[in-house]
Image (tube, rainbow, N blue to C red):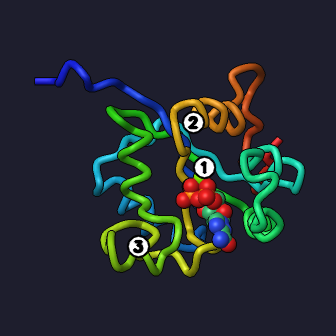
Amino acid sequence: RRKLSAKKERTLGMIKPDAVDKLGQILDKICQKGFLISRLRMCRMNRNQALSFYQEHQSKPFLNALLDYVTSGPVVTFEIVGENAVGAWREAIGPTDPSAARKTAPTSIRAQYGQDVTFNAVHGSSDPGAAAREIEFFFPSSGPVPPNTARVGNCT
Ligand code: RTP
Ligand code: MG
């Protein structure tokens, strides 16, 4: 029986450029953990798009390294739908720093696929408000999502 407090949520997940060559393994792991992916696309962000996506980090010392990283190649982004999706997905990816993840959350995605605190393989929305904004960023509700057919599209 569903708990009264259980609420269906949405969150935005992203496989960052350095982990896209492990796409199959990471998607397998996501499915094994029981997540439902409702929409998914592959695209490449330009610097302005990445800055907009990471606007909460505008004044952080790691901003430029982060923008270099996420624009270095295509990303695979997806919407996850389910009870407590935001928190459950954050838990599944593990702590920001993969070396910490390997100690405290060894079965997490960052423990297995992350390299270091910058190159940490995956993203997860931090809260439901950020999730709504980030889902709209990659899956805009007005206008068609640009088709990515023969080649990887730009994230416009
Ligand atoms: P994310 O947003 O990607 O899910 O990661 P997060 O919440 O765990 O970490 P956040 O603080 O939001 O940082 C966003 C991304 O910036 C890079 N980063 N580098 N000290 C550093 O050099 C540093 N800290 C964070 C990571 O790629 C991180 O995921
Ligand atoms: Mg974050």
Instruction: Say which residue appears at 50% left-offset and 38% top-offset.
Output: 11
Q: Quadrant of the C terminus?
A: top right
The residue that disc 3 covers is 101
Q: Is residue 100 left or right of residue 62?
A: left
In the image, 71 versus 25, the foreground residue is 71
**Mark 1: which secondary structure?**
strand
Residue type highlighted by circle 2? Ala
**Closer to viewer: mark 2 or mark 1:** 2
Q: Quadrant of residue 1?
A: top left
> Taking the image as drawn, is residue 131 in sight?
yes
- Within 10 angstroms of label 2, few (less than 14), some, or many (20 or more) residues? many
Where in the figure is residue 146, as x and y percent of width and height? 77, 37
- In the image, is residue 142 above or below residue 106? above
Label 3 – label 2 distance at C-alpha: 22 Å
- In the image, is residue 2 above or below residue 121? above
Q: Quadrant of residue 84?
A: top left
**Mark 2: which secondary structure?**
helix
